[in-house]
Amino acid sequence: MSAYCPKCGVKVKEGGTDCPLCGYPIPNVDGGKKTDVHPFPTPENIYPAEFKKIKKKILKSITVIFGLAIIIMYVENIYLQGEITWAKYSIASTVSLWVYIGIFLKFIPSKYFYLTAASVNTLGLLFALDYLSGSVTWFYKLGLPLVLGLYGFSLIAVFTYKYLKAKLLIYIGVNMIFATLYFLLAEWAISIFVTGTPQFLWSLIVGIPTFLLALALIYFHYYFPGDIKDEVKRRFHI
């Protein structure tokens, strides 16, 4: 690109310092050193990493507190009674609570593993409480079916949400049907353990209205006009 004198307009050599005609100093606009322009840094979300560090610090603090609590319970029980009696239940519950806190802090990445870990921890606690009483009596007949039933229905609820999250009324209705089934399972297990025979009383009292309401929600989703459904969703915030 040719250079020209800004005063008289005479063509001059590039990089010259003065105009040969009028002596006007020619600015060097192309010969200067170019400064590299650094692009704006790519945004990076550092919240997950920072939050994970915070969660680890919280878990470490809770571990120290719970460890001291276990030592205190053990020493106090030995000092007062000369043997471990009530402390074994408290220690088992404290350890289980520590595991629950670790689970709730989401060190387990998947929601399915989250439910599985919580269920296994619950089963471990119930078995420990039953075993520490001297013999395993109620765990297999009562604790195991109730926890496994709740675990199974929770997995179904999580799995169906992926497919029914756009159809919220159907999702709620389906889970209410499963809740009705769990009521029946719970009373069945409890009645077998207490009386030796299956009985269904309160589960029907609670389950029948729940089941009918679930059917009403499913019917409401398919057969009610869209404007009425939108109005109901707006009023009930669903």
Image (spheres, helix red, strand yellow):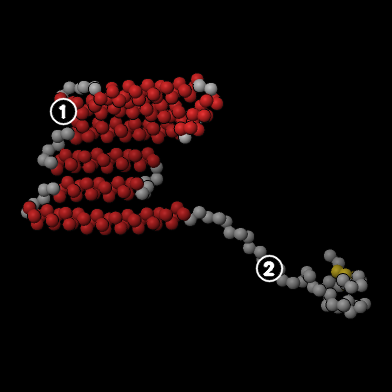
Residue at x-position 24% and y-position 49%: 95
Number of numbered tags placed on the structure image: 2
Q: Which mark is residue 35?
A: 2
In the image, taking residue 9 as reference, residue 77 lies left or right, namely left
- Dot 2, crowdedness within 10 Å: few (<14), some or many (≥20)? few
Above or below residue 60? Residue 152 is above
Q: Which mark is residue 53?
A: none
Disc 1, SS: helix
The answer to the question of whether label 2 and label 1 lie on touching residues, with beta carbons closer than 8 A, is: no
The picture places residue 93, in percent across and down from the top left corner, at 22, 46
Q: Give the mark, 2 or 1, whose residue is nearer the N terminus.
A: 2
In the image, taking residue 160 as reference, residue 7 lies left or right, namely right
Residue at x-position 15% and y-position 40%: 131
Q: Mark 2 and mark 1: span between their CA atoms? A: 85 Å
Residue at x-position 72% and y-position 71%: 33
Residue furthest toward the front?
A: 235
In the depicted view, which residue is nearer to us: 16 or 217? 217
Q: Is residue 29 visible?
A: yes
Amino acid marked by disc 2: Thr
